[in-house]
Protein backbone atom coordinates (compact mmCIF):
# COMPACT_ATOMS: atom_id res chain seq x y z
CA UNK A 1 0.00 0.00 0.00
CA UNK A 2 1.34 3.50 -0.82
CA UNK A 3 1.81 6.15 1.85
CA UNK A 4 -1.19 7.99 0.46
CA UNK A 5 -3.26 4.85 0.52
CA UNK A 6 -2.27 4.09 4.09
CA UNK A 7 -3.20 7.60 5.12
CA UNK A 8 -6.62 7.27 3.49
CA UNK A 9 -7.18 3.95 5.20
CA UNK A 10 -6.11 5.45 8.53
CA UNK A 11 -8.72 8.14 8.23
CA UNK A 12 -11.61 5.85 7.48
CA UNK A 13 -12.40 5.49 11.15
CA UNK A 14 -12.58 9.25 11.72
CA UNK A 15 -14.46 10.37 8.62
CA UNK A 16 -17.28 11.52 10.87
CA UNK A 17 -17.05 13.98 13.75
CA UNK A 18 -14.14 13.22 16.13
CA UNK A 19 -15.18 11.51 19.33
CA UNK A 20 -14.20 14.47 21.49
CA UNK A 21 -15.79 17.18 19.37
CA UNK A 22 -18.17 19.54 21.07
CA UNK A 23 -21.18 21.01 19.34
CA UNK A 24 -22.44 20.32 15.86
CA UNK A 25 -21.18 21.52 12.52
CA UNK A 26 -21.69 25.24 12.12
CA UNK A 27 -22.35 25.79 15.84
CA UNK A 28 -19.14 27.75 16.31
CA UNK A 29 -18.02 25.63 19.28
CA UNK A 30 -14.37 24.62 19.52
CA UNK A 31 -13.44 20.98 18.95
CA UNK A 32 -11.61 19.46 21.91
CA UNK A 33 -9.46 16.37 22.26
CA UNK A 34 -9.02 14.50 25.53
CA UNK A 35 -5.52 13.51 26.58
CA UNK A 36 -6.01 9.75 27.14
CA UNK A 37 -3.43 9.68 29.92
CA UNK A 38 -4.44 12.71 31.98
CA UNK A 39 -7.99 13.56 30.98
CA UNK A 40 -6.97 17.09 29.93
CA UNK A 41 -9.59 18.51 27.58
CA UNK A 42 -7.44 20.41 25.08
CA UNK A 43 -8.58 22.69 22.27
CA UNK A 44 -7.71 21.24 18.87
CA UNK A 45 -6.35 24.68 17.94
CA UNK A 46 -3.31 25.60 19.99
CA UNK A 47 -1.88 29.13 20.04
CA UNK A 48 1.80 29.14 19.09
CA UNK A 49 3.38 32.20 20.73
CA UNK A 50 6.33 32.29 18.35
CA UNK A 51 5.21 34.90 15.81
CA UNK A 52 3.78 37.56 18.09
CA UNK A 53 3.14 41.07 16.72
CA UNK A 54 5.96 43.58 17.12
CA UNK A 55 6.05 47.37 17.19
CA UNK A 56 9.05 49.72 17.08
CA UNK A 57 10.69 50.48 20.38
CA UNK A 58 10.84 54.27 20.45
CA UNK A 59 13.50 54.15 23.18
CA UNK A 60 15.86 51.92 21.18
CA UNK A 61 18.48 53.77 19.16
CA UNK A 62 18.94 50.84 16.78
CA UNK A 63 15.26 50.83 15.89
CA UNK A 64 14.69 47.28 17.17
CA UNK A 65 11.19 46.14 17.91
CA UNK A 66 9.35 45.02 21.00
CA UNK A 67 6.29 42.82 21.35
CA UNK A 68 3.01 44.69 21.04
CA UNK A 69 1.65 43.53 24.40
CA UNK A 70 -1.68 45.25 23.97
CA UNK A 71 -2.30 43.36 20.73
CA UNK A 72 -1.08 40.07 22.25
CA UNK A 73 -3.57 40.53 25.09
CA UNK A 74 -6.29 41.22 22.54
CA UNK A 75 -5.45 38.07 20.55
CA UNK A 76 -5.29 35.91 23.69
CA UNK A 77 -8.59 37.32 24.95
CA UNK A 78 -10.28 36.52 21.64
CA UNK A 79 -8.73 33.04 21.52
CA UNK A 80 -9.84 32.16 25.06
CA UNK A 81 -13.29 33.59 24.45
CA UNK A 82 -13.62 31.23 21.48
CA UNK A 83 -12.41 28.11 23.26
CA UNK A 84 -8.62 28.01 22.80
CA UNK A 85 -6.92 26.79 25.97
CA UNK A 86 -3.45 25.58 24.87
CA UNK A 87 -0.62 28.13 24.57
CA UNK A 88 2.86 27.13 23.41
CA UNK A 89 5.96 29.25 23.97
CA UNK A 90 9.73 28.97 24.48
CA UNK A 91 12.67 30.96 25.87
CA UNK A 92 13.91 31.10 22.25
CA UNK A 93 10.79 32.64 20.69
CA UNK A 94 10.48 36.28 19.67
CA UNK A 95 14.13 37.01 20.46
CA UNK A 96 13.65 35.79 24.02
CA UNK A 97 10.55 37.87 24.78
CA UNK A 98 7.72 35.39 24.17
CA UNK A 99 7.50 33.75 27.60
CA UNK A 100 7.21 37.03 29.47
CA UNK A 101 4.60 38.33 27.03
CA UNK A 102 2.66 35.05 27.28
CA UNK A 103 2.79 35.20 31.06
CA UNK A 104 1.43 38.74 31.12
CA UNK A 105 -1.46 37.83 28.82
CA UNK A 106 -2.44 34.54 30.47
CA UNK A 107 -2.01 35.52 34.12
CA UNK A 108 -5.15 37.64 33.83
CA UNK A 109 -7.14 34.37 33.77
CA UNK A 110 -7.60 31.59 36.37
CA UNK A 111 -4.60 29.26 36.17
CA UNK A 112 -6.72 26.15 35.75
CA UNK A 113 -8.50 27.57 32.68
CA UNK A 114 -5.57 27.12 30.27
CA UNK A 115 -2.60 24.88 29.52
CA UNK A 116 0.93 26.28 29.15
CA UNK A 117 3.57 24.53 27.06
CA UNK A 118 7.15 25.74 27.07
CA UNK A 119 10.57 24.28 26.43
CA UNK A 120 14.10 23.90 27.65
CA UNK A 121 15.76 25.63 24.70
CA UNK A 122 19.38 25.13 25.77
CA UNK A 123 20.83 25.29 22.26
CA UNK A 124 24.01 27.30 22.88
CA UNK A 125 27.04 25.86 24.67
CA UNK A 126 26.67 28.49 27.38
CA UNK A 127 23.37 26.86 28.42
CA UNK A 128 24.50 23.21 28.34
CA UNK A 129 25.51 22.97 31.99
CA UNK A 130 23.10 21.69 34.62
CA UNK A 131 23.10 25.05 36.37
CA UNK A 132 22.34 27.05 33.20
CA UNK A 133 19.64 24.62 32.04
CA UNK A 134 18.00 24.60 35.47
CA UNK A 135 18.08 28.40 35.52
CA UNK A 136 16.31 28.44 32.13
CA UNK A 137 13.59 26.18 33.54
CA UNK A 138 13.15 28.31 36.68
CA UNK A 139 13.07 31.48 34.59
CA UNK A 140 10.25 29.98 32.53
CA UNK A 141 8.20 29.54 35.68
CA UNK A 142 8.94 33.14 36.67
CA UNK A 143 8.21 34.71 33.28
CA UNK A 144 5.03 32.67 32.83
CA UNK A 145 3.86 33.66 36.33
CA UNK A 146 3.09 30.10 37.34
CA UNK A 147 4.30 27.46 39.78
CA UNK A 148 3.81 24.56 37.36
CA UNK A 149 4.03 23.89 33.64
CA UNK A 150 1.41 21.72 31.97
CA UNK A 151 3.45 20.53 28.96
CA UNK A 152 7.24 20.83 29.11
CA UNK A 153 9.43 19.90 26.14
CA UNK A 154 13.02 19.02 25.43
CA UNK A 155 13.31 21.46 22.55
CA UNK A 156 14.10 20.29 19.03
CA UNK A 157 15.78 16.92 19.47
CA UNK A 158 17.70 15.94 16.34
CA UNK A 159 20.55 13.51 17.06
CA UNK A 160 22.15 11.42 19.78
CA UNK A 161 25.18 13.67 20.29
CA UNK A 162 22.97 16.72 20.83
CA UNK A 163 20.65 14.75 23.14
CA UNK A 164 23.53 13.60 25.34
CA UNK A 165 25.15 17.02 25.49
CA UNK A 166 21.99 18.99 26.27
CA UNK A 167 20.02 16.56 28.45
CA UNK A 168 21.86 13.42 29.57
CA UNK A 169 25.48 14.18 30.45
CA UNK A 170 24.51 17.27 32.47
CA UNK A 171 21.81 15.42 34.42
CA UNK A 172 19.05 17.87 33.51
CA UNK A 173 16.69 15.20 32.17
CA UNK A 174 16.86 13.36 35.50
CA UNK A 175 16.08 16.67 37.22
CA UNK A 176 13.09 17.32 34.96
CA UNK A 177 11.75 13.83 35.68
CA UNK A 178 12.00 14.65 39.38
CA UNK A 179 10.10 17.88 38.75
CA UNK A 180 7.43 15.85 36.99
CA UNK A 181 7.19 13.49 39.94
CA UNK A 182 6.79 16.53 42.21
CA UNK A 183 3.96 17.90 40.04
CA UNK A 184 5.71 21.06 38.88
CA UNK A 185 5.80 19.56 35.39
CA UNK A 186 2.50 17.90 34.53
CA UNK A 187 3.60 16.35 31.21
CA UNK A 188 7.15 15.86 29.91
CA UNK A 189 7.90 15.33 26.22
CA UNK A 190 10.01 16.57 23.34
CA UNK A 191 9.80 18.26 19.95
CA UNK A 192 11.51 16.52 17.07
CA UNK A 193 13.48 17.46 13.95
CA UNK A 194 15.79 14.65 12.91
CA UNK A 195 16.51 11.31 11.28
CA UNK A 196 14.23 8.29 11.52
CA UNK A 197 16.94 6.28 13.29
CA UNK A 198 17.16 8.70 16.21
CA UNK A 199 13.38 8.89 16.45
CA UNK A 200 13.35 5.09 16.70
CA UNK A 201 15.88 5.32 19.54
CA UNK A 202 13.67 7.78 21.43
CA UNK A 203 10.75 5.42 21.04
CA UNK A 204 12.88 2.53 22.30
CA UNK A 205 13.57 4.36 25.58
CA UNK A 206 9.93 5.30 26.15
CA UNK A 207 9.69 2.83 29.03
CA UNK A 208 12.65 4.55 30.72
CA UNK A 209 11.59 8.18 30.31
CA UNK A 210 7.83 7.79 29.79
CA UNK A 211 7.26 10.47 27.18
CA UNK A 212 3.88 11.98 28.05
CA UNK A 213 3.54 13.59 24.60
CA UNK A 214 5.62 14.34 21.51
CA UNK A 215 5.55 17.35 19.22
CA UNK A 216 6.22 16.67 15.53
CA UNK A 217 6.20 18.64 12.30
CA UNK A 218 3.17 17.33 10.44
CA UNK A 219 1.31 18.64 7.41
CA UNK A 220 0.18 17.22 4.08
CA UNK A 221 3.59 17.92 2.49
CA UNK A 222 5.74 16.46 5.28
CA UNK A 223 3.39 13.47 5.60
CA UNK A 224 5.33 11.52 2.99
CA UNK A 225 7.83 14.00 1.50
CA UNK A 226 9.79 15.31 4.52
CA UNK A 227 12.73 13.01 3.83
CA UNK A 228 12.87 14.13 0.21
CA UNK A 229 12.78 17.81 1.15
CA UNK A 230 15.62 17.41 3.66
CA UNK A 231 17.45 14.16 4.37
CA UNK A 232 17.66 15.15 8.05
CA UNK A 233 13.89 14.91 8.45
CA UNK A 234 11.52 12.01 9.14
CA UNK A 235 8.23 11.59 7.30
CA UNK A 236 5.31 12.63 9.47
CA UNK A 237 3.25 9.55 8.68
CA UNK A 238 5.94 7.33 10.20
CA UNK A 239 6.25 9.38 13.40
CA UNK A 240 2.50 9.75 13.83
CA UNK A 241 1.81 6.02 13.57
CA UNK A 242 4.73 5.12 15.88
CA UNK A 243 3.33 7.47 18.51
CA UNK A 244 -0.24 6.35 17.98
CA UNK A 245 0.53 2.69 18.61
CA UNK A 246 2.22 3.64 21.90
CA UNK A 247 -0.77 5.80 22.93
CA UNK A 248 1.47 8.89 23.11
CA UNK A 249 -0.53 12.08 22.40
CA UNK A 250 0.74 14.03 19.39
CA UNK A 251 1.18 17.81 19.29
CA UNK A 252 1.48 19.27 15.79
CA UNK A 253 3.85 22.07 14.86
CA UNK A 254 4.14 23.72 11.44
CA UNK A 255 0.78 22.60 10.03
CA UNK A 256 1.29 25.39 7.46
CA UNK A 257 5.07 25.02 7.11
CA UNK A 258 5.63 28.55 8.30
CA UNK A 259 2.95 29.83 5.95
CA UNK A 260 4.22 28.03 2.83
CA UNK A 261 1.02 25.98 2.66
CA UNK A 262 -1.13 29.11 2.80
CA UNK A 263 0.81 30.96 0.09
CA UNK A 264 0.91 28.34 -2.62
CA UNK A 265 1.78 28.82 -6.31
CA UNK A 266 -0.99 30.34 -8.40
CA UNK A 267 -1.80 27.21 -10.40
CA UNK A 268 -2.19 25.24 -7.14
CA UNK A 269 -4.30 28.02 -5.63
CA UNK A 270 -6.58 27.73 -8.65
CA UNK A 271 -7.13 24.02 -7.94
CA UNK A 272 -8.09 24.77 -4.32
CA UNK A 273 -10.52 27.49 -5.37
CA UNK A 274 -12.06 25.37 -8.10
CA UNK A 275 -12.82 22.68 -5.57
CA UNK A 276 -13.97 24.85 -2.63
CA UNK A 277 -14.16 28.57 -3.53
CA UNK A 278 -15.19 29.67 -0.04
CA UNK A 279 -12.49 27.82 1.93
CA UNK A 280 -9.08 29.35 2.65
CA UNK A 281 -6.03 27.41 1.51
CA UNK A 282 -4.84 27.36 5.12
CA UNK A 283 -8.04 25.67 6.31
CA UNK A 284 -7.27 22.63 4.15
CA UNK A 285 -3.93 22.18 5.92
CA UNK A 286 -5.51 22.51 9.37
CA UNK A 287 -8.28 20.07 8.52
CA UNK A 288 -5.60 17.60 7.41
CA UNK A 289 -3.83 17.46 10.77
CA UNK A 290 -7.04 17.71 12.76
CA UNK A 291 -8.53 14.70 10.99
CA UNK A 292 -6.10 12.34 12.74
CA UNK A 293 -7.56 11.27 16.12
CA UNK A 294 -4.16 10.91 17.82
CA UNK A 295 -3.56 14.65 17.45
CA UNK A 296 -4.16 16.44 20.76
CA UNK A 297 -3.69 19.96 19.40
CA UNK A 298 -2.32 21.70 16.31
CA UNK A 299 -0.22 24.79 16.90
CA UNK A 300 -0.48 27.92 14.83
CA UNK A 301 1.66 31.02 15.16
CA UNK A 302 -1.02 33.67 14.73
CA UNK A 303 0.29 37.21 14.34
CA UNK A 304 -2.90 38.89 13.20
CA UNK A 305 -6.55 38.61 14.11
CA UNK A 306 -7.53 37.33 10.65
CA UNK A 307 -5.19 34.34 11.14
CA UNK A 308 -6.84 33.52 14.46
CA UNK A 309 -10.36 33.95 13.12
CA UNK A 310 -9.78 31.73 10.09
CA UNK A 311 -8.24 28.98 12.23
CA UNK A 312 -11.08 29.21 14.75
CA UNK A 313 -13.56 28.82 11.92
CA UNK A 314 -11.77 25.64 10.79
CA UNK A 315 -11.80 24.02 14.22
CA UNK A 316 -15.12 25.33 15.59
CA UNK A 317 -15.96 22.59 15.03
CA UNK A 318 -13.66 20.49 12.83
CA UNK A 319 -15.09 19.13 9.60
CA UNK A 320 -12.81 16.09 9.08
CA UNK A 321 -11.46 15.31 5.64
CA UNK A 322 -13.20 12.70 3.56
CA UNK A 323 -11.09 10.07 1.82
CA UNK A 324 -11.59 11.92 -1.47
CA UNK A 325 -10.43 15.21 0.06
CA UNK A 326 -7.38 13.52 1.56
CA UNK A 327 -6.48 12.09 -1.85
CA UNK A 328 -6.83 15.62 -3.28
CA UNK A 329 -4.31 16.94 -0.73
CA UNK A 330 -1.84 14.22 -1.62
CA UNK A 331 -2.21 15.32 -5.24
CA UNK A 332 -1.51 18.91 -4.12
CA UNK A 333 1.56 17.76 -2.18
CA UNK A 334 2.89 16.08 -5.31
CA UNK A 335 2.50 19.36 -7.22
CA UNK A 336 4.15 21.34 -4.42
CA UNK A 337 7.24 19.14 -4.64
CA UNK A 338 7.88 20.50 -8.14
CA UNK A 339 8.68 23.93 -6.67
CA UNK A 340 12.23 24.10 -5.31
CA UNK A 341 11.66 26.51 -2.46
CA UNK A 342 14.04 26.86 0.49
CA UNK A 343 12.46 24.89 3.40
CA UNK A 344 12.34 27.91 5.72
CA UNK A 345 9.40 27.87 8.14
CA UNK A 346 9.99 31.38 9.50
CA UNK A 347 10.54 29.94 12.99
CA UNK A 348 13.08 32.72 13.73
CA UNK A 349 15.41 30.33 15.58
CA UNK A 350 18.27 31.73 13.46
CA UNK A 351 17.61 35.24 14.73
CA UNK A 352 18.95 37.63 15.72
CA UNK A 353 21.82 37.58 13.24
CA UNK A 354 24.93 39.22 14.77
CA UNK A 355 25.30 41.24 11.57
CA UNK A 356 21.68 42.36 11.46
CA UNK A 357 20.66 40.27 8.44
CA UNK A 358 16.95 39.47 8.10
CA UNK A 359 17.48 35.80 7.33
CA UNK A 360 13.80 34.70 7.26
CA UNK A 361 12.80 37.78 5.27
CA UNK A 362 15.34 37.01 2.54
CA UNK A 363 14.38 33.34 2.27
CA UNK A 364 10.63 33.99 2.40
CA UNK A 365 10.84 36.62 -0.37
CA UNK A 366 12.77 34.14 -2.52
CA UNK A 367 10.11 31.47 -1.91
CA UNK A 368 7.31 33.94 -2.60
CA UNK A 369 8.80 34.80 -5.99
CA UNK A 370 9.12 31.11 -6.87
CA UNK A 371 5.46 30.55 -6.02
CA UNK A 372 4.36 33.60 -8.00
CA UNK A 373 6.49 32.76 -11.03
CA UNK A 374 8.74 35.78 -10.54
CA UNK A 375 12.06 33.95 -10.52
CA UNK A 376 13.47 34.24 -14.07
CA UNK A 377 16.27 31.82 -14.92
CA UNK A 378 17.35 33.55 -18.12
CA UNK A 379 16.90 36.93 -19.76
CA UNK A 380 15.26 35.06 -22.63
CA UNK A 381 12.20 34.26 -20.50
CA UNK A 382 9.08 35.87 -22.04
CA UNK A 383 8.18 37.51 -18.71
CA UNK A 384 11.78 38.37 -17.79
CA UNK A 385 11.32 42.14 -17.41
CA UNK A 386 8.19 41.83 -15.30
CA UNK A 387 9.64 39.08 -13.09
CA UNK A 388 12.98 40.90 -12.65
CA UNK A 389 11.24 44.06 -11.50
CA UNK A 390 8.90 42.13 -9.18
CA UNK A 391 11.84 40.38 -7.51
CA UNK A 392 14.08 43.41 -7.06
CA UNK A 393 11.38 45.89 -6.04
CA UNK A 394 9.77 43.35 -3.70
CA UNK A 395 13.16 42.51 -2.18
CA UNK A 396 13.87 46.15 -1.29
CA UNK A 397 10.38 46.60 0.12
CA UNK A 398 10.37 43.47 2.27
CA UNK A 399 14.01 43.52 3.44
CA UNK A 400 15.88 46.78 4.26
CA UNK A 401 19.10 47.13 2.24
CA UNK A 402 21.37 46.90 5.26
CA UNK A 403 19.73 43.60 6.22
CA UNK A 404 19.97 41.92 2.80
CA UNK A 405 21.98 38.83 1.86
CA UNK A 406 25.03 40.72 0.56
CA UNK A 407 25.93 41.53 4.19
CA UNK A 408 26.28 37.86 5.19
CA UNK A 409 29.84 37.15 6.39
CA UNK A 410 29.36 33.38 6.40
CA UNK A 411 30.03 33.12 10.15
CA UNK A 412 27.64 30.16 10.39
CA UNK A 413 26.31 31.12 13.81
CA UNK A 414 22.76 30.59 12.50
CA UNK A 415 23.20 27.04 11.19
CA UNK A 416 23.09 25.04 14.46
CA UNK A 417 19.78 26.67 15.36
CA UNK A 418 17.88 25.80 12.16
CA UNK A 419 15.52 22.85 12.82
CA UNK A 420 15.20 22.28 9.06
CA UNK A 421 18.96 21.79 8.65
CA UNK A 422 19.30 24.59 6.08
CA UNK A 423 22.86 25.68 5.31
CA UNK A 424 21.83 29.30 5.76
CA UNK A 425 25.04 31.10 4.69
CA UNK A 426 25.18 28.95 1.55
CA UNK A 427 21.58 29.84 0.66
CA UNK A 428 22.14 33.54 1.41
CA UNK A 429 25.25 33.65 -0.78
CA UNK A 430 23.40 31.84 -3.57
CA UNK A 431 20.48 34.27 -3.38
CA UNK A 432 22.83 37.25 -3.25
CA UNK A 433 24.62 36.03 -6.39
CA UNK A 434 21.24 35.65 -8.10
CA UNK A 435 20.16 39.17 -7.05
CA UNK A 436 23.42 40.61 -8.36
CA UNK A 437 22.84 38.95 -11.73
CA UNK A 438 19.35 40.43 -11.82
CA UNK A 439 20.74 43.87 -11.05
CA UNK A 440 23.50 43.60 -13.64
CA UNK A 441 21.20 41.85 -16.12
CA UNK A 442 23.67 39.05 -16.69
CA UNK A 443 21.31 36.08 -16.33
Image: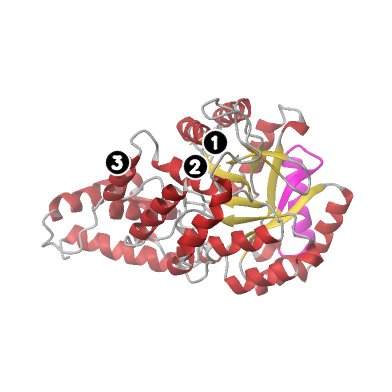
Give, as a single range, the part of the protein colored magenta: 128-152
Marks 2 and 3 sit apart, C-alpha to C-alpha, by 43 Å
Along the line of sight, the residue nearer the viewer: 307 or 355? 307
Which residue sits at x=62%, y=25%?
A: 81
- Give the quarter of the figure containing the C terminus: bottom left
Marks 1/2 in contact by CB < 8 Å: the verdict is no
Look at the image and tell me whether residue 407 can be seen.
yes
First in sequence: mark 1 vs mark 2: 2
Q: What element carries label 1?
A: helix
- Please name the residue that numbered disc 1 is placed on: 315
- Left or right, 141 with reference to 376: right
**Residue 242: % across, % down:** 64, 63
Marks 1 and 2 sit apart, C-alpha to C-alpha, by 35 Å
Look at the image and tell me whether residue 122 can be seen.
no
Marks 3 and 1 sit apart, C-alpha to C-alpha, by 22 Å
- Please name the residue that numbered disc 2 is placed on: 64
Badge count: 3
Which label sits in the foreground, 1 or 2? 1
First in sequence: mark 3 vs mark 1: 3
In the rendered image, the vertical position of residue 162 relative to residue 382, given as above or below: below
Marks 3/1 in contact by CB < 8 Å: the verdict is no
Marks 2/3 in contact by CB < 8 Å: the verdict is no
Q: What element carries label 3?
A: helix
Question: Residue 373 lies in magenta, yes or no?
Answer: no
Which residue sits at x=72%, y=31%?
A: 107
Along the line of sight, the residue nearer the viewer: 19 or 266? 19
- Please name the residue that numbered disc 3 is placed on: 274
Amino acid sequence: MTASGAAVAGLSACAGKPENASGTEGSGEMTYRTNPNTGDKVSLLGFGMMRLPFIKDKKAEDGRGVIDQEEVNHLVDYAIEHGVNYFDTSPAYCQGMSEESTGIALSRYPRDSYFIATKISNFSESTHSFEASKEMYLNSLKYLKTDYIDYYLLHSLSNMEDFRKRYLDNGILDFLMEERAAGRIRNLGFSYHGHKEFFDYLMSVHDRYHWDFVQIQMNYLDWEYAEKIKSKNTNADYMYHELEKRNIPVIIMEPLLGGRLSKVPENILAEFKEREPELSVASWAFRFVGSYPGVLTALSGMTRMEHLQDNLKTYSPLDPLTEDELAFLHHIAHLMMQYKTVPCNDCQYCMPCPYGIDIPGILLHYNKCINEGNLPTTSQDPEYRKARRAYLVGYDRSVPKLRQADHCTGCGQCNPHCPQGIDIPKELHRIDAYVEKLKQETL
